[in-house]
Amino acid sequence: MKKYIYFILFLSFLSCDEWLTIVPKAEITEEQLFKEEAGYRSALYGLYVQLGQTSLYGRNLTMGFTDVLAQYYAIPSESFAYYKTSIYDYEDQETKRYIGDIWHSAYNVVANINNLLQHLEGHETGFFTEPRAYNIMRGESLGLRAMLHFDLLRLFAPAAPNAKAIPYVDALVKTPFPQLTVQQTIDRCLKDLQEASDLLYEVDPISPFFPTWTEISPVNAGQDSYINDGGFIYLRRERMNYLAVRALMARINLYAGNRAEAQRLAGECVNSGRANLSTSYTAVANNVFSIFVEKLPQISDSLFSTVVPINQCLVVPVERKQAYYETSIYGSVDSRIANYFQYYPGTSSEFLAKFRITRQTIPPSYATVPLITSAEVRLIYSETADTEADKFARLNTVRNSYGLSASYNLSADKNDYEQELFKEYRKRFVGEGQLFYFMKRKNYQSIPYAGTSVSIDRIFSLLEYLPTAEYEYGLINK
């Protein structure tokens, strides 16, 4: 029996229009897909489209489920689907559906990654006309596999090295993979990322191996000698590039408590000059890795804006936003206030407008969801600094980039670093799913605005709320 594989295909990659135009789903055999080089490229591009599903980074793991858990929004009414999630009722059927969708969708993408990696075997030389293609494809695939496993780990498993965690699925087989511990999963993630780093270093133009770097698009590709492949290496920030791999390694090492290694890797990204900050949220350089989501404006509007009744929206009451951005201290100088929010007409409540903004830097305008940002890299670099003075100096650099001038700089003699770091994560990562993970990593004993008596351990570990079949057939123990 022939195996069929479903991909959203990009039949060519000759222009930005083709990067942004999603060709209808096609049913093709594996033999057809992987017969020629174009099929491998299509399979790789299809992975990024899958990441943008609403069950993953198109909603649940960014602006939706994980940010609801972080208590960014006020959800006073049961009429909105996320209400039970906001009070950590993981037994609720709707909440369990979100949990199951995240789990199944992530492992489905992992399966497609493993399928691509399996077909790449034996094609190191001689098959691809573009000599860098093998390293790019394998390197990006390994990086994506590690990213997905790590996000499953930090969402579902306890933040303790020896705790039961998740399976690390690194092959296409019919038998279930064993459940690893947290530390074992982290080790596997870092192993994949180290190989990805080695593969990408000398072929990815965003890598420091290349003395200079310019964001490449179809508009300026002719100016760059290393782009001669029909566009395969366009838009590196929208792919799992070398810098993203190193930043992800820094994120994972910080989570694991390997502070020196996290600082080294974050410092490498910062000092590359390719992870800069801008007061404009839409600036390309603010992202180390982001994904294009075709229907992002519609997804955003369905959660936040005027297309749905306000009693069903995820809203940020004005007093909560003022607390987030400390307007009693700084007024409205923080550029994120204007960049991230808009008022719901006729009310004092605001909604998140981050993902209604289209980016004009690379025509035509399009919307992306950030998965790894320059701000996060710099905050890791700050948190892991060797002295309190350096921690605050690096934190102030981030704050300054959003319009908080040097007159507002923080210092060890006046401020508590951990408290200020939390504030910066909350200000910067609204809509991006990172705050919940931050509080879990820091072992917070309560979540601001939670208003619940639920055990904090129960809030931070979702492993016991998976679909029943995972315990019966998937070798998962709660």
Image (cartoon, grey):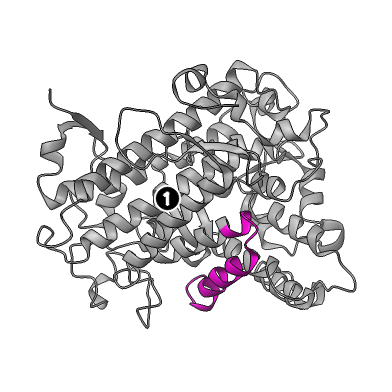
Which residue is at a point 72% across and 38% down the rendered structure image? 71
Q: Residues within 10 Å of mark 1 (few under 14, many from 20)?
A: many
- Front residue of 298/64: it is 64
- Front residue of 100/352: it is 100
Q: What residue range appears in magenta? A: 253-277
Q: Classify mark 1: helix, strand or loop.
A: strand
Left or right: where 269 falls relative to 397:
left
Q: Is residue 366 visible?
A: no
**Location of mark 1 (residue):** 291
The percent position of residue 172, horizontal first and vertical second, equals 29, 36
Total marks placed: 1
For the stretch drawn in magenta, the main secondary structure is helix
The image quadrant of residue 409 is bottom right
Which residue is at a point 51% across and 36% down the rendered structure image? 166
The percent position of residue 391, horizontal first and vertical second, equals 73, 72
Q: Is residue 265 magenta?
A: yes
Which residue is at a point 51% across and 71% down the rendered structure image? 269
Task: Name the amino acid, label 1.
Answer: Ile
The percent position of residue 110, horizontal first and vertical second, equals 37, 40
Q: Is residue 124 visible?
A: yes
Q: Is residue 437 magenta?
A: no
Q: Quadrant of the N terminus?
A: top left
- Front residue of 339/5: it is 5
The percent position of residue 381, horizontal first and vertical second, equals 63, 69
Which residue is most to the bottom?
Answer: 211
Q: Quadrant of the C terminus?
A: top right
Left or right: where 22 falls relative to 328:
left
Is 435 located above or below residue 475 in the figure?
below
Which residue is at a point 20% across and 51% down the rendered structure image? 121
Left or right: where 243 falls relative to 389:
left
